[in-house]
Image (cartoon, rainbow, N blue to C red):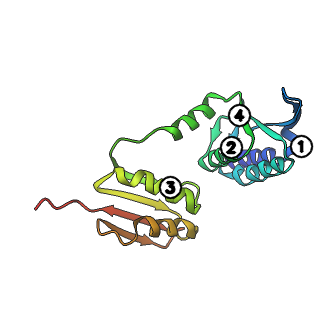
């Protein structure tokens, strides 16, 4: 049932004819309004990215209507953030779930972390950014775990770049079941 719903969401997002409406903006310029589906989950991310690209190729402003969004995953959030940052893309009617997801990303983290688990976009740059942002908050004796280090080489490359060669970290790599990196932050000796 969940897989069928995910496929349906991916189909809705990746088919611009089903969900896009053309309107005229206040300045008289053509603007596409893309109504986002209720579930922007991992299955929908690839189709969503292609839909955004196709709309941006038309060189018109794009407006994302987020009124129906109830589920939003990190890859889709990253796509939306990139579109809003780099192109003329605006968001209207954000649902409570949509607004909450973006609010959570904007928070400045200040609390100590005992166990940091990263299993997000599987791309090099976002994984590197996440490690650099949160690793300083991992307490001595704490652990960082990253999933999919074998099936997505970009994840392992990010681990190597950010934590490789550091004497305060001990890295264990497991190759089975898509790969797993477990990184122990060593306790500081008080001698």
Q: Secondary structure at mark 2?
A: strand
Mark 2, other Cα within 10 Å: few <14 / some 14–19 / many ≥20: many
**Precedes in sequence: disc 3 or disc 4:** 4
66 or 179: nearer the eye? 66
Q: Which residue is mark 4?
A: 91
Marks 1/2: CA distance?
A: 18 Å
Decide which of tag 4 and tag 2 comes sooner along the chain.
2
Examine the image and state in which quarter residue 81 appears. top right
Rendered location of residue 164, percent (x, y): 40, 70
Q: Earlier in the sequence, mark 1 or mark 3?
A: 1
Visible residue check, residue 108:
yes
Mark 4 is surrounded, within 10 Å at the Cα level, by few (under 14), some (14 to 19) or many (20 or more) other residues, namely: some
Q: Which residue is mark 2?
A: 40
| Distance from the alpha carbon under mark 4 to that under mark 2 | 15 Å
Residue assigned mark 1 = 17
Residue drawn at point x = 63 percent, y = 50 percent: 75
Residue at 58 percent across and 37 percent down: it is: 102
Residue at left offset 74%, top offset 40%: 89
Q: How many marks?
A: 4
- Image point (84%, 26%), residue name: 26
Where in the figure is residue 119, as x and y percent of width and height? Answer: 52, 56
């Amino acid at each position: 049932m969940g897989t069928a719903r995910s496929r349906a969401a991916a189909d809705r997002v990746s088919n611009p004819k089903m969900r896009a409406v053309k309107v005229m903006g206040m300045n008289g310029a053509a603007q596409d309004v893309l109504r986002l589906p209720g579930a922007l989950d991992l299955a929908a991310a690839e189709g969503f990215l292609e839909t955004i690209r196709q709309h941006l190729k038309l060189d018109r402003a794009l407006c994302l209507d987020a009124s129906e969004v109830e589920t939003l995953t990190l890859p889709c959030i990253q796509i939306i953030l990139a579109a809003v940052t780099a192109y003329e893309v605006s968001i209207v009617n954000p649902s409570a779930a949509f607004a909450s997801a973006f609010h959570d990303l904007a928070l400045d983290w200040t609390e100590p972390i005992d166990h940091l688990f990263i299993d997000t976009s599987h791309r090099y740059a976002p994984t590197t950014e996440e490690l650099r942002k949160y690793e300083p908050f991992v307490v001595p004796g704490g652990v960082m775990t990253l999933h999919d280090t074998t099936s997505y080489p970009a994840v392992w490359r990010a681990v190597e770049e950010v934590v490789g060669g550091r004497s305060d970290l001990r890295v264990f790599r497991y190759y089975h079941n898509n790969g797993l990196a477990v990184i122990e932050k060593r306790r500081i000796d008080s001698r």
